[in-house]
Image (spheres, rainbow, N blue to C red):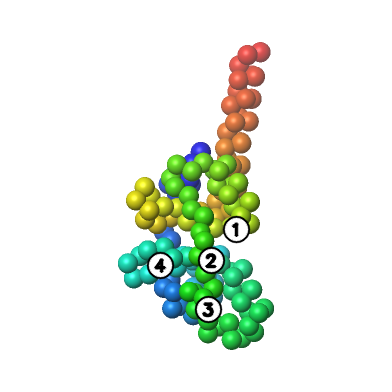
Amino acid sequence: MTVAAILKHKGHDVASVRPTTTVAELARLLSGKRIGAVVVQDAAEQLLGIVSERDIVHALAANDTRALDMTAGQLMTRALKTATLRTTVGEAMTMMTAGRFRHLPVLDEHGALIGIVSIGDVVKARIMQQDHEVDSLKAYVAGSV
């Protein structure tokens, strides 16, 4: 199974903000959409980085309430790992586990952002994949008796 299959089921919507968006605005967006991260894009929709709930918590711990006036550009992770539609669920899980992050932007063959998958999406897909394999093995064993 690939990231393409996850996005086919999940959809391609991606929440994004500009680098000048404040942390207070980010927090409202994350809460309102019930999501854990947003990508940061410039006016030309170039992917600049990603900001997660974890980034906001670290900023609050380091800067107290002053963090609310900081911007997405100040908090974002710039060195992004990304996936393509051909990235397998196993590869995505390995990247996310090794990098200790929970959101993976998906780019098309031209480098344009076309989706995002979370660790929850990847785990769900992996479980579905394993369930299918178990069912296939059961059917094979039952048919060969």
Q: Nearer the viewer, residue 78 or 20?
A: 78
> Do the numbered discs 1 and 4 sit on residues whose CB atoms are within 8 Å?
no
3 vs 4, front mark: 4
- CA gap between label 1 and label 4 equals 19 Å
On the image, numbered disc 3 is attached to which residue?
23
> Gap between marks 2 and 3, in whole Å?
14 Å
Name the residue located 53 percent from the left edge and 78 percent from the top edge. 23
Q: Position of residue 20 (x, y in %)?
A: 43, 78
Task: Give the Cα separation between the discs numbered 3 and 4.
Answer: 15 Å
Q: Give the mark, 4 or 2, whose residue is nearer the N terminus.
A: 4
Q: Which residue is mark 2?
A: 77
Query: Is 145 on the left-hand or right-hand side of 84?
Result: right
Q: Which residue is mark 1?
A: 101
Which residue corresponds to the image point at 43% horizontal and 45% vertical from the top-left?
85
Q: Position of residue 10 (x, y in %)?
A: 46, 51
The percent coordinates of residue 141 (x first, y second) are 65, 19
Q: Looking at the image, which is closer to me, 87 or 32?
A: 87
Task: Work out whether residue 57 or residue 19 is closer to the camera in this orientation and state it.
Answer: 19
The three-letter code of the residue at mark 1 reads Phe
| Left or right side of 15 for 121 | right
Residue kind at label 2, given as amino acid type: Thr
Q: Decide: marks 4, 2 in contact (CB < 8 A)?
A: no
Write the residue at 58% across / 82% down: 67
Query: Which comes before the other along the chain, label 1 or label 4?
Result: 4
Does residue 133 appear in this view? yes
* Amino acid type, mark 3: Val
Looking at the image, tell me whether mark 3 or mark 4 is earlier in sequence order: 3
